[in-house]
Image (cartoon, grey):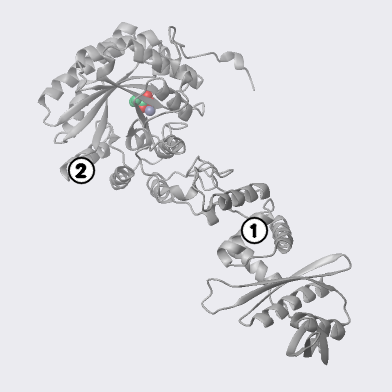
């Protein structure tokens, strides 16, 4: 790193704040949400959305439940203007949704903005000008007084155009670059605008406090919000709106602390799209609230669908580890995580309890994710729990614990060797290929049983390589009798250790799965047999184990 001394604080920590918000533990009700996807999000895209794409996104935002949507900067481009007109003229704005439009404090832009919203039942006109020290000195080269004049000029023009407008108009003012502005000056300029707009509790004005660029830790922003709430006139006639960008990766924290400190409204975007590092991700904010038992009043129950539309129209990609929506955010690869999750899921079965499954902050199915496919992921880090869980829940094979463990190691080593994740179907195919109905070099061509006092007698035809042996053996049961025949015909010795079986649920034809373990020379071998006949399935399982032993 070259020289950190060239940087210093660009924010102004307000004085006189009591920081009572620190004592609050959580947000108790959802804020008013305003999506700025179609404006702040759109202006930051490599290829801005076409009119059709904006329309598709607008419909998605309405479906999610946004009641306030900043649809653009109509005076900025033809597409922006056309989009606004299309929504109004084709009656595409639901009655309970208010569109918001952004304007600079210049007469022809304000005029064009009011022209664009002509005919809208309700619109928010959002006026902004930049107030920070850096912008005043370097960009506008204007004094504080002159910057206030810009805001007052725009506010007065807004009044003038509002007087002629047919629909309901709400005003919003943003001291852009608020976080780089001295708090006293930010309050002063907002108060000037408030004096011109004369809000009342029934006709509120929105004062938006943007983190245009993030300069400080979140608690400083929260203190700035607290300061504004205490120093603005007519607080009861104001809606305090927060608009955090994510330069320091703190947009969510800024928003949450800002809400604790008095904010009423959040402007943000889906997945945090927006200038540079983006705006605050409303999905994260809303689901953070949801995970604490607060209904955010936005519907993210189908995040995969929302992601798909978003990626299509914006040409952006949702990062794999984006909170709640990323492809990997519910995935557990690690064996111990998979094990804890599987146990946690089983623990809550038939129990009324709040969601507290280890490693899963929310139930993935609440946001349209599939537990089996999204959570239990198989790679070389996975454990027997997860691998066994996949075989059981997706392919109906309930392996005995020791075999589950052995199969887990088998799968992990394949994944490690191939250096890749394995899909559930691949796990199953490996299971079938390497453990089920293995019938070379030994097979049982025929087995006829009869009952005897000691158990069972078996007349068997055993094939070992090319050699066929006919023999009659005894055992304490059918499997034991066949096992003895195999031992005699092949000359190999082993101990028949464990045998379990179950019906293969979910199959149209009724089949049984049997699992057998045998041991020889201190090693254990496992085999599985599947057959419509339960005895045959057990013989096939034994043969699988013997053949695995012989070919190892
Ligand atoms: O980030 C910002 O300051 C803005 C303003 C126009 C509100 O987007
Ligand atoms: Zn912004």
Q: Is residue 36 left or right of residue 87?
A: right
The residue labelled by disc 2 is 86
Q: Is residue 395 above or below residue 136?
A: below
User: Residue 365: which disc?
Assistant: none
Q: Secondary structure at mark 1?
A: helix
Disc 1 versus disc 2: nearer the observer: 1
Residue 318 location, x and y as percent?
A: 48, 44
Q: Is residue 356 left or right of residue 231?
A: right
Residue at image position (21%, 45%) is 92
Ligand 2 shows up in which quadrant of the image?
top left
Residue at image position (41%, 20%) is 261
The residue labelled by disc 1 is 387
Closer to the N terminus: mark 1 or mark 2?
2
When asked about the image quadrant of residue 123, the answer is top left
Q: Secondary structure at mark 2?
A: helix
Quarter of the image containing the N terminus? top right
Residue 443 location, x and y as percent?
A: 76, 84
Q: CA distance from mark 1 to mark 2?
A: 53 Å
Front one among 533 and 100 = 533
């Amino acid at each position: 790193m070259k020289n950190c001394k060239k940087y210093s604080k660009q924010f102004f920590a307000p004085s006189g704040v009591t920081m009572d918000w620190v004592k609050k533990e959580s947000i108790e009700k959802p804020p008013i949400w305003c999506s700025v996807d179609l404006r702040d999000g759109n202006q930051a895209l490599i290829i801005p959305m076409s009119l059709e794409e904006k329309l598709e996104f607008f419909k998605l935002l309405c479906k999610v439940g946004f009641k306030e949507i900043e649809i653009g900067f109509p005076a900025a481009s033809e597409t922006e203007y056309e989009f606004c007109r299309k929504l109004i003229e084709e009656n595409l704005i639901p009655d309970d949704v208010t569109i918001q439009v952004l304007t600079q404090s210049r007469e022809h832009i304000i005029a064009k903005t009011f022209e664009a919203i002509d005919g809208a039942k309700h619109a928010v006109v959002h006026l902004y000008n930049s107030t920070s020290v850096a912008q005043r000195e370097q960009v506008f080269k204007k004094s504080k007084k002159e910057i206030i004049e810009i805001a007052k000029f725009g506010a007065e023009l807004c009044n003038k155009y509002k007087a002629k407008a047919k629909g309901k108009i709400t005003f919003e003012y943003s001291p852009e670059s608020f976080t780089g502005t001295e708090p006293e000056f930010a309050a002063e300029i907002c108060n000037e605008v408030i004096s011109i707009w004369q809000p009342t509790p029934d006709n509120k004005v929105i004062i938006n406090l943007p983190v245009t660029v993030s300069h400080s830790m979140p608690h400083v922003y929260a203190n700035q919000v607290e300061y504004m709430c205490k120093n603005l006139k007519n607080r009861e006639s104001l809606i305090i709106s927060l608009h955090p960008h994510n330069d320091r990766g703190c947009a969510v924290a800024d928003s949450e602390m800002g809400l604790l400190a008095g904010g009423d409204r959040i402007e943000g975007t889906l997945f945090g799209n927006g200038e540079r590092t983006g705006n605050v991700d409303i999905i994260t904010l809303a689901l953070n609230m949801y995970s604490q038992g607060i209904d955010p009043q936005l519907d993210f129950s189908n995040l995969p669908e929302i992601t798909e539309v978003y990626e299509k129209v914006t040409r952006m990609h949702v990062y794999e580890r984006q909170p709640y929506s990323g492809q990997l955010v519910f995935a557990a690869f690690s064996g111990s995580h998979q094990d804890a999750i599987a146990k946690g899921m089983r623990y809550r079965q038939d129990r009324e309890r709040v969601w507290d499954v280890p490693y899963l902050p929310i139930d993935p199915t609440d946001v349209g994710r599939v537990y089996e496919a999204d959570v239990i992921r198989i790679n070389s880090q996975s454990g027997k729990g997860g691998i066994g869980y996949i075989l059981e829940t997706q392919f109906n094979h309930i392996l005995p614990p020791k075999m589950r463990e052995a199969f887990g190691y088998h799968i992990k080593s394949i994944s490690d060797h191939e250096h890749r994740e394995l899909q559930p179907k691949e796990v199953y195919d490996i299971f079938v290929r390497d453990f089920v109905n293995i019938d070379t070099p030994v097979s049982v061509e025929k087995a006829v049983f009869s009952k005897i006092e000691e158990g069972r007698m078996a007349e068997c035809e055993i094939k070992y390589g090319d050699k066929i042996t006919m023999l009659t053996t005894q055992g304490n049961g059918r499997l034991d009798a066949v096992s003895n025949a195999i031992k005699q015909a092949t000359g190999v010795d082993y101990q028949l250790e464990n045998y379990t079986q179950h019906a293969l649920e979910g199959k149209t034809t009724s089949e049984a799965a049997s699992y057998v373990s045998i041991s020889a020379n201190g090693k254990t071998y496992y085999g599985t047999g599947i057959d419509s006949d339960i005895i045959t399935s057990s013989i096939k399982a034994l043969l699988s184990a013997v053949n695995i032993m012989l070919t190892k």
